[in-house]
Amino acid sequence: MKKLMIICGGQSTENLVSRMSCTSVLKNLHRDYYDLTLVGIDQDGQWYLLDDTQDDLATKGWLDLATPVKDVYQLIQQQDVIFPVLHGKYGEDGTIQGLFELAQVPYVGCHTLASSVAMDKIYTKKILQTVGIPQVKSLYVKKRYDGKYVVVNQQFEETEDVLKTVKETLGFPCFVKASRSGSSVGCFRVDREEDFLDILEQTGQYDSHIVVEEYIDCIELETAVLGNDDPVVSRVGQIMPHGEFYTFESKYEDEESKTCIPALVDADIQEKIREYALKVFKAIDGHGLSRVDFFLDKKTNQVYLNEINTMPGFTKISMYPQLMADYGLSYSDLIDRLIELAFER
Ligand SMILES: Nc1ncnc2c1ncn2[C@@H]1O[C@H](COP(=O)(O)OP(=O)(O)O)[C@@H](O)[C@H]1O
Ligand SMILES: [Mg+2]
């Protein structure tokens, strides 16, 4: 029996989302296939061994029966394989993947490079420009250590009048987003020019890399990629967010937000998206899994890449497992397949 370590929680703003994902993983894991160690990381980065019989890791008492891990590295080295069910900073950004690499223990999902590229919306854009994936007009704004906000151009030269550049190149409304965030935390729609600088400052609290994008009145479409050398791609799913856009609340708390598989858009658009998704996965050097998200401009029917998530939301009702179920892989079999793929390296 393989020694499997599952990790949840983490230091990112998506700690709770990770515990929601992990609750579903535990419920559906073929327990008799694995010798399981369940680990939780709290918001301060402390690792704990968790009671794996609790049926909801998303409650406040998730650490009640936990014991602190004294030697994290040793614990990692004792495993045959690791499934980091972690989203966001220090979980999905290549850092913890680097730790597993050092310890030479196979793990589920993308490796360090793909994880860190996909975590950073700005660097994702730069890589995907090279393979001609259409993307919305955007600017890279950086918060320097001296506190100044600058626009960084394609030559990495910095200019200071951020508002003027945004006004001239993108206009309003626009989207201002922390480049290395997720779950719509640090993601704002700015309708009025006079609000821009305040919102930029707010976004700067989350990340020094900020992406400002032209606003697209769009349909949101997502697709699931699974595999290593020869990945497969699911059909395309459609997000029907309730509210202004797909905010944290509409993602996790608003039952009016719905998804639909397959998407209610033309077949040729869906084919294009599936083709792009595979290209994106290859271009970032993906392994294991990723969910690749697109915008379809309602006015022009143009498809744009939005982002790639290397550890997408993983509750049973999340888009990635649903797309894979539609593909023919049940949630429990999907977990086995991901673990199998971890060993293939
Ligand atoms: N340029 C844009 N135009 C219109 N809506 C956007 C744009 N960028 C983001 N959004 C909305 O904000 C949501 C979150 O943005 P996204 O880039 O996917 O960040 P996250 O990594 O937090 O999911 C999207 O699902 C979409 O609803
Ligand atoms: Mg998103």
Image (cartoon, helix red, strand yellow):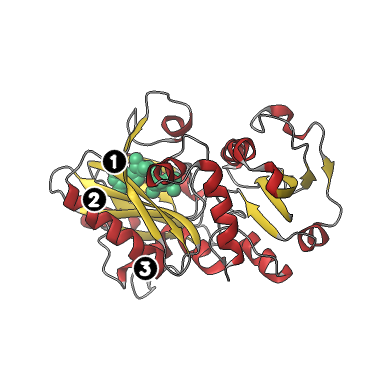
Between tags 2 and 3, which lies in front? 2
Q: Would you name the residue on which mark 3 appears?
A: 126
Image location of residue 117, percent across then percent down? 47, 64
On residue 270, which mark appears? Answer: 2
The span from disc 2 to disc 3 (Cα, nearest Å) is 24 Å
Q: Quadrant of the N terminus?
A: bottom right
- Image quarter of residue 193: top left
Dot 2 crowding, Cα within 10 Å, few <14, some 14–19, many 20+: many
Q: Residue at x 59, y 62 (%)?
A: 342
Residue 123 lies left or right of residue 207; in this view the side is: left
2 and 3 marks in contact (CB < 8 Å): no
Looking at the rendered structure, the kind of residue marked 1 is Pro
Q: Would you name the residue on which mark 1 appears?
A: 262
Residue 66 lies left or right of residue 86; in this view the side is: right
Dot 3 crowding, Cα within 10 Å, few <14, some 14–19, many 20+: few
Q: Quadrant of the C terminus?
A: bottom right
Looking at the rendered structure, the kind of residue marked 2 is Gln
Dot 1 crowding, Cα within 10 Å, few <14, some 14–19, many 20+: some
